[in-house]
């Protein structure tokens, strides 16, 4: 397996506080790599730097072998990186399938096409329907987005991320705000799509992470203190001390 | 270009600017705190002029008429707030615009019904009718100096009110953080009504001050409201300081543009071309300025920190 | 068929049949009313593209009506007084100028307005329309404040616009085309992006759409369509004045859209019809009340001058209580 994403010696500080401290991490093609860490560990800062919204003070980010450290966000999207948001961001007034079809449409370049009805476009609709099927929402396709539950909105977010056909999906806390039942559904969903996609999962929910991840990296005070399989992480003393210990 | 004309026109520009500030400050106050777009703000300006006109005839005293008209317009502002604005606060701006648009039609027609279709002249007392020599051949009507004086006075009072009183503190907090004010246990409805009434009184005052020069006329508010919009767009919606600076700027540019633009154009083009193009350009001048400001700063010159 | 499209069809059918019938039965006045209604409906349909579907609250749409009308009036003026050749009365050229000037004005002002959001946008569109108003007022050559009489109507192949039926027919067909055009645009891929940007701009940007360009394109299309309506309006009134692009006129157009129901194809037409008919009914009713009032009070009162009073009150009531406009009211139960 080759590394799809490689982060080397990343540093970022805000007014003397190190949010990212000599962070090194690699995500290999096809794996689901989870980053966990207690609150304030610098997870959000990390994801902002990965999608280009914040510029690191030093260090490099390599994507598909190329240096993207200074590449602006929309260009990263075109290189094959997509992200989901911690806070749901959908077009509530439109139907579920319209939301997904719009994401498919975005994948196909500009939309200055005025004549053919978009809802009659089989290519768009079929692809959108496929995606909805994958996230288990095919029966709600024609409903207005606002009528769906929070958990279903999170599933829509995943479908939109899938629509971009990105090589790397950055998922920012997809379980945020979900109940136990909904979390289980999300874990099943992610289990279904992993392998076909490389995923970097930033997540708070321990059970979910251990159920899903191929490898886990533990982030504490902006520094990765350990990387390994779920079993290795569970057995790692430093991790237990720094992180799991707190909860035990 | 002769010097005394420049001085006189500068004073005229200052006068227009201050009147604009009186209208714009209420508009920006109401928007900044209540998040309410009030197209009918110009109607309060008109009502100020009409009440002042009637009362001037009734009392035979212009100043007394102004003093009595002020609370009347403030109360009318309260009525407008109660009847129309309050049910619309939670709606979007489109509904604000349409609702107050309806209010303009109603108020304009009511004024027509009550005062008739003709404008009303407002006579000035003798002591205000004279002219004051300001040295050289610069002679300025006393009343214009009064407008400038009272405009500056009202502006000063407003700054004091907003910056140094408890009400002002609430206004400033309310503009940036509405939940905070509610959390402080302040009666927010009361605060909103007060702000609305204050804005109404300011607009009414502007109408009263202009009435002796133009006359109280139907639709007078609808012309100034757009210029007031330009002022608060340029100044930054919700900013009192922005409204003041932008109002003076727009007042001066508009007045000086209309009087001197043809002279300036003559420096660069033929007399004939200058005389045909100058009126057109000066008519558009403030809008061009607005466009230029927005091209550089889409939030206006002094955008408030929040919103 | 949905109830809303049924309503739209009925309205369009009535609009096609009634006016000529009135005309042939000696009520030419009602044909004129219908022509005005139809032309304003085109402008309302064009406004709905940006206001309803694009969420851009433009308070300056009457400016395009004015620009379009002057695109007929100014060439006709020079044709009459300066003898600049018969091309100046050619309707296709008039329409071409009207559409082009409106599109350019929309492009320039839209590029600035669309940098802003919310209440700024409302006020700036209003201010730019007022700029055109003052510009026309300042050009005394074309009548300034007093307006300009259009001495000759546009010459078009096959049509004679001096014939009120022809003019109505042209306006009607134009309205149908405008509705089909907007329907096509809002359902296209472009329309999806436009509506998505209205619903959640940030998400639409994140998906990779430059929403500014999509909005601006819609803004220009809408302006050009309204300019076309203006050219028809000039031919209808044969008199143009800055008054018709006053901000009240813009407010009325906006109201037609909201009254009928934004984000529906037929809504603006229904709104324009209701608006014009209401105006007519109020003026008539008040006029009819004048003589009994005269005998009652002993003084002459021109009540019909005051139709704005009940009208304004009605607008307020509609804003306060009728959500979704007439379409929402009549097509209730549908999404």
Image: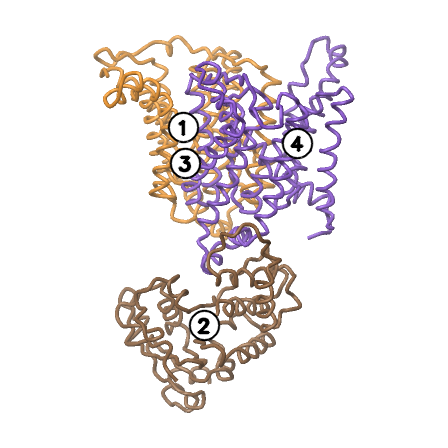
Instruction: Look at the numbered disc 4 and give the secondary structure of its residue.
Output: helix
The numbered dot on residue B70 is: none
**Residues beneath discs 2 and 4 located on the same chain:** no
Q: Nearer the viewer, mark 2 or mark 3?
A: 2
Question: Which secondary structure, mark 2?
Answer: strand
- Relative to residue C130, is residue A128 drawn left or right? right
Look at mark 3 in the image and give the residue it sits on: B232
In three-dimensional space, the C-alpha distance between marks 1 and 2, rounded to whole angstroms, equals 55 Å
Q: Do the dots labelled 3 and 4 sit on one chain?
A: no
Task: Using the numbered discs, state the Cα–Cα distance from disc 1 to disc 4 in whole angstroms.
Answer: 34 Å
**What is the C-alpha distance between the residues marked 3 and 1?**
10 Å
Question: Mark 1 falls within which chain?
Answer: B
Task: State which chain disc 3 sits on.
Answer: B
Residue C249 percent coordinates (x, y):
56, 29
Asked whether, in this view, residue B288 is left or right of residue B76, the answer is: left
Identify the colour of chain A in the image. brown
Residue A169 image label: 2
Q: Which residue sits at x=74%, y=18%?
A: C289
Q: CA distance from mark 3 to mark 4?
A: 32 Å
Q: CA distance from mark 2 to mark 4?
A: 53 Å
Question: Residue A246 versus residue A132: which sits nearer the camera?
Answer: A132
Residue marked by disc 4? C275
Can residue B36 be seen by looking at this rendering? yes
Residue C129, placed above or below residue A147: above
Give the residue at x 46% y 75%.
A203
Q: For marks 2 and 3, give the CA distance.
A: 45 Å
Q: Quadrant of the N terminus of chain B?
A: top left
Chain coloured orange in this rendering: B
Residue to which mark 1 is pinned:
B20
Tag 1 secondary structure: helix
Q: Are marks 1 and 2 in contact (CB under 8 Å)?
A: no
Chain letter, disc 4 residue: C
């Amino acid at each position: 397996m080759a590394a799809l994403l490689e982060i080397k010696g990343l540093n970022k500080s805000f007014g003397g506080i190190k949010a990212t401290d000599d962070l090194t991490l690699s995500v290999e093609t096809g794996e689901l790599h989870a980053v966990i860490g207690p609150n304030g560990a610098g997870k959000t800062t990390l994801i902002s730097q990965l999608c280009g919204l914040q510029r690191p003070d030093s260090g490099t980010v390599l994507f598909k072998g190329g240096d993207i450290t200074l590449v602006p966000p929309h260009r990263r999207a075109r290189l094959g990186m997509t992200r989901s948001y911690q806070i749901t961001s959908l077009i509530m007034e439109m139907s579920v399938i319209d939301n997904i079809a719009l994401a498919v449409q975005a994948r196909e370049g500009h939309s200055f096409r005025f004549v053919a009805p978009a809802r009659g476009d089989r290519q768009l609709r079929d692809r959108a329907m496929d995606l909805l099927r994958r996230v288990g929402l095919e029966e709600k396709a024609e409903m207005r987005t606002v009528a769906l539950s929070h958990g279903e909105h999170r599933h829509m977010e995943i479908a939109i991320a899938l629509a971009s056909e990105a090589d790397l999906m950055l998922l920012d806390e997809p379980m945020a705000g979900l109940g136990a039942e909904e979390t289980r559904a999300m874990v099943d969903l992610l289990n279904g799509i992993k392998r076909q996609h490389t995923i970097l999962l930033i997540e708070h929910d321990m059970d979910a992470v251990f159920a899903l991840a191929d490898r886990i990296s533990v982030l504490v005070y902006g520094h990765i203190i350990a990387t390994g399989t779920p079993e290795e992480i569970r057995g790692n003393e430093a991790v237990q001390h720094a992180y799991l210990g707190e909860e035990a | 270009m002769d010097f005394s004309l420049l001085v006189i026109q500068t004073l005229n520009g200052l006068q227009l600017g201050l009147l604009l500030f009186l209208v714009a400050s209420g508009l920006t106050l109401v928007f900044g705190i209540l998040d309410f777009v009030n197209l009918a703000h110009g109607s309060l300006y008109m009502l100020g002029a009409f009440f002042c006109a009637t009362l001037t005839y009734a009392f035979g005293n212009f100043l007394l008429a102004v003093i009595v008209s002020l609370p009347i317009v403030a109360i009318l502002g309260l009525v407008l707030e109660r009847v129309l604005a309050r049910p619309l606060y939670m709606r979007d701006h489109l509904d604000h615009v349409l609702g107050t648009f309806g209010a303009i039609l109603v108020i304009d027609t009511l004024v027509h019904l009550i005062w008739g279709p003709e404008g009303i002249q407002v006579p000035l007392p003798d002591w205000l009718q004279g002219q004051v020599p300001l040295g050289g051949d610069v002679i300025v009507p006393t009343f214009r100096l009064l407008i400038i004086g009272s405009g500056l006075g009202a502006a000063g009072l407003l700054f004091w009110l907003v910056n140094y009183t408890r009400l002002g503190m609430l206004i400033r907090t309310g503009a940036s953080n509405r939940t905070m004010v509610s959390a402080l246990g302040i009666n927010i409805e009361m605060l909103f009504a007060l702000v609305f009434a204050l804005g109404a009184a300011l607009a009414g005052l502007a109408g009263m001050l202009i009435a002796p020069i133009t006359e109280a006329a139907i639709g007078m508010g609808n012309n100034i409201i757009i210029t007031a919009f330009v002022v608060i767009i340029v100044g930054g919606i919700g900013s009192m300081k922005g409204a003041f600076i932008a109002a003076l700027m727009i007042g001066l540019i508009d007045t000086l543009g209309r009087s001197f633009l043809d002279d300036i154009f003559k420096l660069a083009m033929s007399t004939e071309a200058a005389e045909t193009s100058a009126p057109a350009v000066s008519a558009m001048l403030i809008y061009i300025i607005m466009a230029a400001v927005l091209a550089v700063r889409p939030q206006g010159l002094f955008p408030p920190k929040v919103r | 068929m949905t109830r809303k499209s049924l309503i739209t069809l009925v309205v369009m059918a009535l609009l096609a049949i009634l006016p000529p019938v009135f005309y042939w039965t000696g009520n030419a006045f009602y044909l004129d009313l219908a022509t005005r209604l139809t032309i304003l409906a085109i402008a309302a349909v064009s406004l709905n593209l940006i206001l309803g579907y694009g969420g851009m609250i433009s308070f300056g749409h009457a400016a395009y009506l004015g620009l379009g009308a002057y695109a007929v009036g100014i060439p006709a003026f020079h044709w009459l007084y300066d003898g600049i050749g018969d091309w100046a009365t050619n309707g296709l050229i008039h329409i071409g100028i009207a559409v082009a000037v409106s599109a350019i004005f929309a492009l320039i002002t839209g590029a600035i307005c669309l940098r802003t959001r919310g209440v700024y946008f409302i006020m700036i569109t209003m201010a730019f329309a007022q700029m055109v108003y003052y510009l026309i007022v300042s050009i005394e050559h074309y009548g300034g404040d007093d307006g300009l009489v259009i001495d000759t109507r546009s010459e078009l192949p096959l049509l004679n616009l001096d014939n009120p039926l022809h003019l109505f027919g042209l306006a009607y067909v134009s309205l149908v085309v405008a509705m089909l055009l907007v329907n096509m645009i809002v359902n296209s891929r472009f329309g999806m992006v436009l509506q998505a940007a209205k619903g959640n701009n940030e998400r639409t940007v994140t998906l990779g759409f430059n929403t500014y360009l999509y909005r601006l394109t819609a803004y220009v299309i809408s302006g050009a369509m309204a300019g076309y309506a203006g050219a028809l309006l000039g031919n209808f009134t044969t008199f143009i004045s800055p008054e018709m692009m006053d901000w009240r006129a813009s407010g009325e157009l906006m109201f037609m859209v909201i009254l009928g129901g934004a984000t529906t194809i037929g809504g603006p037409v229904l709104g324009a019809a209701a608006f014009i008919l209401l105006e007519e009914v109020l003026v008539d009713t008040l006029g009819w009340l004048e003589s009994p009032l005269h005998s009652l009070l002993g003084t002459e009162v021109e009540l019909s001058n005051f139709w704005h009073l009940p009208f304004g009150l009605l607008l307020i009531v509609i804003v306060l209580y009728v959500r979704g406009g007439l379409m929402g009211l009549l097509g209730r139960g549908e999404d």
